[in-house]
Every structure is written in C-alpha cells, then in structure tokens.
C-alpha cells in the first residue's frame, strides 16, 4: 500500500505598494534574541541563532512558499540577508528601522543600502513620538522612504498610533500589533516592565484594521508564544482582509518544522473562510 505524500499549503501573494510578497512573512525578532518572554529565553535565542542557522531558517521559509522577511535594519541582519542572496536565496526584505541603531534616517539609509524593497518605522518609536506630539521626523522619514522608491509603512502597538498615521500620512501599509505589551509612551525602547498581553487590545486593533485604507501586516498574533497557534491563526483569519499580510517569528530549536506548520495553520484558516 502506498502512502500519499503529505500536502502542505503555500501562502498566497499580496502587494505592499507595488512590491509582491507572500501573505505570510517570516519575522525576525528571535534572530536578535527578542523573545518577549524572559531574559533566559532571549539568551537561548541568541545562542541558537548563529548566522548559519538564520540562513537555514531563511531556506526553510522559502521551501514553505514564504517570499519575504521582515527584519531589522541592523548590520547583522543585513549581512545574513546578503549572504543568503549570494547563496541563491530570493527573500524580499521588508526593513524595520530600529532606534538603538540610530536615527530614523539612518535606519532608512540601512534599508536602502541593504537592498530592502519596503521600509517601515519602528513601532516603539512611533508610539513614543505620536504620544509626545513629536512627529516631524516621522513625516520626513516616510517622505525619504518614498523618494527612494521603497514601499513605506509604520508600525504601532497602540491603536492611537495607527489612527494618527492613517489620518496624517500617505502610506503603502500599516504594521498593526495585536497587543501593547509595554508602555512605549515613556521611551522608544522597551520599558523593562513585565509584558502584558490583554484580550481587549487584540480586539481593539483588529477592529481598527477593518477601517485602514491600506494593507495591514498583522503582528504579535501569537502573543510572543503565549497563544495557542491554532486559535491564534483562526482569530487572524477572522480579522484578515484581502491584501493584508501576517508576520510570524519562529524558534526552530523548539521545532524545526515550525514555519511550515504555521503556514499550514494560517492558510488553512484563511481558505476555510474563503480568503
């Protein structure tokens, strides 16, 4: 008796501006040791994700049909992508500026020199600047991204940040966090407080997503590993609009097949709803 080969689902394609990407995006926080769990977990991720293992994760993502990586605009990720491309990889880079590296403009310069096709402003910095009314650098940053031909977006953990961006900026996409785990109004960086993942915040952001004029990239959908994946992706599928995308970070030490399993869960939930 022959055994049928296991069938996996491939992500559909969407566009940010005029840049085609898979609607499942490989996130990058675990590569840099950002577990959003514990300091011990951060170290485990840093110890695990050598350059070679990051590149192997890129290859696993491409085998699962993922065509884009959402990664930080720092030189480590830039080097990883550069090596991946030189070795035959084709992931599109959606670049996140990162305030610990420097200014918004420096983050954008890294995106441009590193070969990114899309660039968005860091969610913590967006929350901090919008809360304080310090938005000129945001406006200048979006203009710079567009001037250099990249698709332009912003991230935010707070619905107020995303509302402000929708009302005041001409964007190609929004990065919409399902949760507001830390108070970023006090600092663009992590506050150091214990993170909180509240259901009411997920509900509020998903309601706002329905009103946005451009595609949303849904992120922190697993609450940094706190949510059951099946439930989480079914929730995403309910909130998902045609043209949106979903960003998920993975820790392949825990499960080498994590990317394919997540793609199957997301695509299965979306297709069950005709999306």
Image (cartoon, rainbow, N blue to C red):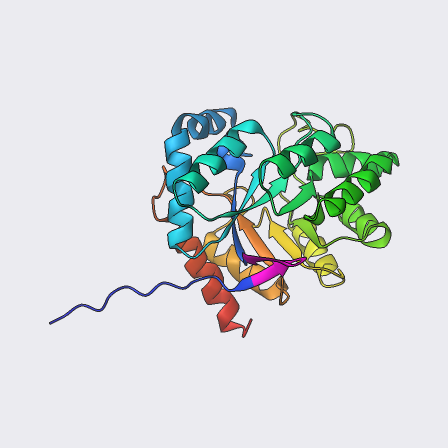
Q: Residue at x 49, y 66 (%)?
A: 269
Q: Which residues are magenta?
A: 14-21
Q: Quadrant of residue 23?
A: bottom right
Q: Nearer the viewer, residue 51 or 126?
A: 51
Residue positioned most to the left: 1
Position of residue 140 relative to residue 175, above or below, is above
Quadrant in which residue 131 is drawn: top right
Q: Residue 53 versus residue 226: which sits nearer the camera?
A: 53
- Image quadrant holding the N terminus, namely bottom left
Residue that appears at 88% across and 36% down: 133
Q: Was residue 19 drawn as part of the magenta stretch in this picture?
A: yes
Q: Is residue 38 shown to the viewer in this render?
A: yes
The reply to whether residue 196 is visible in this rendering is: no
Q: Residue 169, image x and y in percent?
A: 82, 50
Count the numbered circles shown: 0
The verdict on residue 133 being magenta is no
User: In terms of secondary structure, what is the magenta stretch mainly?
Assistant: strand
Q: Kindly identify the residue that appears in the image at 46 percent across and 24 percent down.
A: 43
């Amino acid at each position: 008796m022959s055994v049928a080969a296991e069938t996996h689902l491939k992500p559909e394609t969407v566009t940010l501006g005029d840049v085609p990407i898979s609607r499942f995006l490989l996130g990058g926080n675990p590569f840099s040791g950002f577990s959003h769990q514990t300091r011990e977990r951060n170290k485990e991720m840093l110890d695990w994700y050598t350059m070679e293992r990051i590149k192997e994760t890129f290859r696993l993502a491409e085998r699962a049909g993922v065509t884009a990586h959402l990664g930080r605009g720092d030189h480590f990720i830039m080097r990883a992508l550069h090596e991946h491309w030189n070795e035959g990889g084709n992931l599109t880079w959606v670049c996140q500026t990162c305030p610990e590296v420097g200014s918004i403009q420096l983050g954008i310069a890294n995106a441009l020199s590193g070969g990114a096709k899309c660039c968005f402003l860091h969610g913590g910095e967006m929350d901090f600047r919008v809360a304080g009314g310090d938005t000129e650098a945001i406006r200048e940053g979006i203009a710079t991204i567009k001037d250099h031909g990249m698709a332009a977006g912003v991230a935010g953990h707070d619905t107020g940040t995303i509302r402000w961006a929708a009302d005041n900026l001409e964007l190609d996409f929004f990065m919409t966090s399902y949760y507001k785990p830390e108070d970023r109004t006090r600092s663009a960086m992590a506050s150091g407080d214990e993170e909180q993942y509240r259901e009411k915040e997920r509900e509020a952001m998903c309601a706002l997503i329905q009103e946005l004029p451009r595609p949303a990239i849904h992120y922190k959908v697993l609450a940094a590993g706190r949510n059951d994946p099946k439930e989480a992706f079914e929730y995403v599928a309910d909130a998902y609009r045609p043209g949106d995308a979903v960003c998920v970070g993975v820790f392949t030490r825990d499960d080498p097949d994590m990317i394919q399993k997540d793609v199957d869960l997301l695509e299965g939930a979306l297709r069950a709803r005709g999306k």
